[in-house]
Image (spheres, helix red, strand yellow):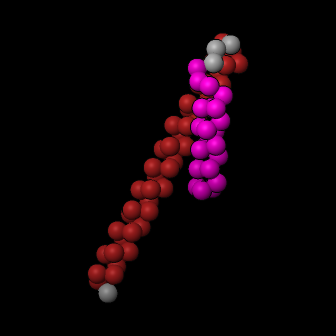
Amino acid sequence: MRIESQFNREYIDMKGEMWLDKIYRLKELTEQLNHYRDSYYNNSESLISDKQYDDLFDELQSLEEETG
């Protein structure tokens, strides 16, 4: 019973770390996309290709669905 409890705590911690990594990635992607969008619309400067932007946006959308 004690080993099982320890395993469950470790699993929860690992799951929490993975979730936290996703939250950090969400924040990072949001900041990146905002920067690229601002540069494109306000400075008429494209810093990355449309494909790269779309890939980042798709990743963000996927993470948002996973984390709620």
Magenta stretch: residue 27 in it?
Answer: no
> Residue at position x 44%, y 62% from top?
15
Q: Quadrant of residue 29?
A: top right
> Residue at position x 62%, y 50% from top?
62
Residue reaching furthest to the bottom: 1
- Quadrant where the N terminus is found in the figure: bottom left
- Quadrant where the C terminus is found in the figure: bottom right
Q: Quadrant of residue 3?
A: bottom left
Residue 51 at x, y = what percent?
64, 32
> Residue at position x 39%, y 69% from top?
11
Residue 56 at x, y = what percent?
59, 37
Residue 44 at x, y = what percent?
68, 13
Which segment is the magenta one? Answer: 47-68
Horizontal side of residue 4 vs 52, given as left or right: left
In the image shown, does 61 or 16 lie closer to the viewer? Answer: 61
Q: Where is 52 relative to 21, above or below?
A: above
Residue reaching furthest to the right: 41
